[in-house]
């Protein structure tokens, strides 16, 4: 059974930092592309960052230079380091596991709220 469990969300002031984690089980983690998406109220889900199984990374324009995605294949975990947070970063953040073939799997999401 595939499980993706996000953690690390919370309330932070503008300019602050958070690190999200997504622990995967039930998959061969190393062959999956992993990604973080987010969805703010009333908005569509958007790609935040992704890392391929070879370690290539990519970022949404709004987070470039502030967020860093990384993966630890030994721990079956993908991370999202978020620095210089802005109120517009407030959203539910979802972890996604994308297999070589077939549909993506999703976690339940973790809330990030940036407010003074």
Image (cartoon, grey):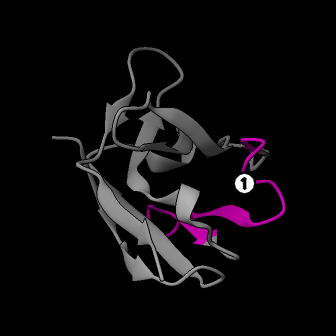
**Which residue is at 55% across, 48% downward?**
30
Question: Which residue sits at x=65%, y=63%?
Answer: 70
- Is 9 in the magenta? no
Outermost residue toward the front in this view: 116
Looking at the rendering, which quadrant does residue 2 occupy? top left
Residue 1: give x, y in percent of width and height.
15, 40
Q: Mark 1 = which residue?
A: 63
Q: Is residue 56 shown left or right of residue 78?
A: right
- Residue in the foreground of this view, choosing between 17 and 8: 17
Answer above or below: position of 78 versus 99.
below
Secondary element at image label 1: loop
Range of magenta residues: 59-81
Query: Does residue 70 appear in this view?
Result: yes
| Residue 74 on the magenta span | yes
Rendered location of residue 93, percent (x, y): 41, 53
Q: Look at 59% across and 82% down and name the residue there.
A: 17
């Amino acid at each position: 059974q595939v499980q993706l469990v996000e953690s690390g969300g919370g309330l932070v002031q503008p300019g602050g930092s958070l690190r999200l984690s997504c622990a995967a089980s039930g998959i061969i983690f190393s062959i999956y592309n992993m990604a973080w998406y987010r969805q703010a109220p009333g908005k569509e889900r958007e790609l935040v960052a992704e890392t391929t199984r070879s370690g290539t990374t990519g970022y949404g324009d709004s987070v470039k230079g502030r967020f860093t995605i990384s993966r630890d294949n030994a721990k079956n975990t993908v991370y999202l380091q978020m620095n210089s947070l802005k109120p517009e970063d407030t959203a539910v953040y979802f972890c996604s596991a994308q297999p070589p073939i077939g549909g993506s799997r999703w976690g339940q999401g973790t809330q990030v709220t940036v407010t003074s």
